[in-house]
Amino acid sequence: MNGWLSAAALLLLVGFAPTVWGAASGPVRRRVMAQNLATLAGCLVLLLLAQGYARPSYVDLALVLAVLGPAGTLVYARLLADELAERPARDPVARALGRAMTPLAAVCVPLVVLPLCVATGPGRAMVKLLAIGALLIGGNIVSTRALSARHATGHTPRGTGHTPQATGPERHTTGGQSGAAGG
Amino acid sequence: MSRRARLWVLAVGGLGLAVLLFAASLELPGFGGDWHPYGVRAVEAALARHTSNVVAAVNFDQRAFDTLGEESILFCAALGTVVLLRQTSDEHRVRPEPARVAPPVRRYALVALPVTLLIGLYIVAHGQLSPGGGFQGGVVVATALHLLYIAVDYRALERIRPIGLYAMADAAGEAAYLLLGAAGLIAGTAYLANVLPYGTFNTLASGGTVPLLNAAVGVEVASGVVVLLASFLDQAVEIVDADDPDSSGRNSDQDNSGRPRAPDNSDQPPAPDTSGRTPTPHNPPEEKPT
Amino acid sequence: MRPVADVLIVLALALVAASSTAAVLARDPVRQSTVLALLGLSLALLFAVLQAPDVALSQLAVGSALTPLMLLLSVRKVRRKGKEGGSHRNAGNRTGSTDQEGRR
């Protein structure tokens, strides 16, 4: 009973608090990536809180955040395309975040969702939890891709010259990854 | 007044406010105590009316008149935005360039749109049972529709967004709330009284008028937010000053830096439905977006 | 249960205080918008911790996508307007970035 709340507090401190710093300092790219990570961490905290307070209806909060969080990141990716493209990822934090986001989502979400599923037992609540997990992973992969796609467009001309080959494989991988996310 | 004197006035005012707030906080009941006179009565009243979400019972039953005011705030805000951000005579519309969105993002948006829409409707429909309600669900529904602008193209959003229809739905939602309140008068009790049968506790058809009022607010908020954002989007994407000679050529929806994008800068081909079109430097103002 | 719940409340309050201070200190609206998103999330978490899920849901619905969208659309319009009117705001930004590129 107590462990869920402790886990939520730990995740709030370790996962969410650094993103406040990340979103409040540095270049725009780092800030948007921090926002992306914050929605992931916040959603997992909300799931843990729902279990910790023994209120299944609180799961709706995580459900809404799981769809609106990536939408928010896509808003930034769309409307700050210039800022994201013009300032290349010289910031080590942004680069590390961009690389770590997808594995982080793929590891952390099951790490939280699967114990919650075991605790709730089979039923509609478990289906909801699994749906939230799938939405979170899919949304985070896509929004991270959206951010790094901008990164690729801004970076390629400077780094490797005007070679279409440089963008070709990138495009291929983005398509493949999203296919996995969508399925 | 000099800057120094103004700072002094600010300091005195702030200090006075701080002292008053501190004095007031001494009289407050303890944080998280077990004495909740209003809470106990609100919960009792909510359970008597078979509404399991007490907050919904307070918002849409016990204090439904307050919610009418809150709903009108958004209605007036949307109205004011439409009036303030209208297209004036010295402005004209240009067709935005098709956006270049990465295909995975586009595919995600097309999957996420119905899911988000469904979640929004779920939040509206379950307002009397679980956290949520008309406002929250309405905003989620409106956000879902705008995934089309965020991740697909502005013209895709315009295709499913006849503004007149949404403006009418906005007004209809507001009117429905007023009329549902009048139902109480017709039934011979007070305005906005809960006159419908309360239904079975903890089912969708419980709470009497609460779900109906929730639905009215949901329609009002969803269409109000759509109309609100439409004004913002029109101003940001389509409307430019008429006296600016080169603005129409630059009005790229995708890239507002004013520089033409190098062709190899984009790692994505243009959208299949827009690939035939090239941005023309001067669009006639009457050319409506398709 | 009690001490953990208190720790959660204190943590959420601290996060709200930190992010709102950062939002006030950020001057550029674009940079401010990301801080605002974080502030909205922290507020939602605070409301959830205080067990006010309806308020938290409102905050999440409005703060996570709608507020950034409206804010950034306004920024885009103002910048375009400034450019049309001959303001040097965007031009300054561009020369700044080319300066950086030159230094690199």
Image (cartoon, coloured by chain):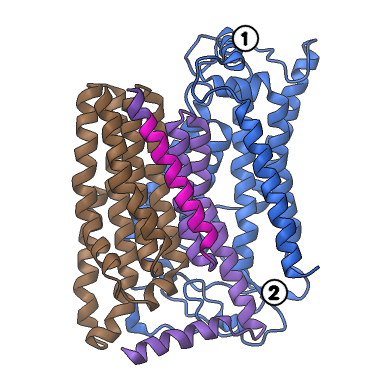
Q: Which residues are magenta?
A: C6-26
**Apparent colour of chain A:** brown
Q: Position of residue B118 (x, y in %)?
A: 44, 37
Q: CA distance from mark 1 to mark 2?
A: 54 Å
Q: Residue at x 20, y 40 (%)?
A: A110
Mark 1 = which residue?
A: B197
C100 on left or right of B173 = left
Is residue A97 among the parts visible in the rendering?
yes
Determine whether B119 is above or below B3 in the image: above
Q: Quadrant of the C terminus of chain B?
A: bottom right
Same chain? Circles 1 and 2: yes
Task: Check the rendered structure and report the hue given to chain B.
Answer: blue
Residue shown at 31%/33% (left/top)?
A48
* Residue that carries the numbered disc 2 in the rendered image: B92
- Judging depth in this view, the residue of B11 and B86 nearest the camera is B11
Q: SS of the residue at dot 1?
A: loop
Q: Earlier in the sequence, mark 1 or mark 2?
A: 2
Question: Residue B287's x, y, as percent?
Answer: 63, 73
Q: Quadrant of residue B245?
A: bottom right
- Disc 1: which chain? B
Estimate how packed mark 1 is, as few (under 14), some (14 to 19) or many (20 or more) residues with alpha carbons within 10 Å: few
Q: Main secondary structure of the magenta part?
A: helix
- Answer whether residue C15 is magenta in the image: yes
In the displayed structure, A29 sits above or below A57; it is below
- Amino acid type for the residue under numbered disc 1: Pro
Going by the image, does B99 lie left or right of B64? left
A73 to C10, vertically: above or below: below
Q: Compared with residue C62, is residue B253 higher up or lower down, i.e. above or below?
A: below
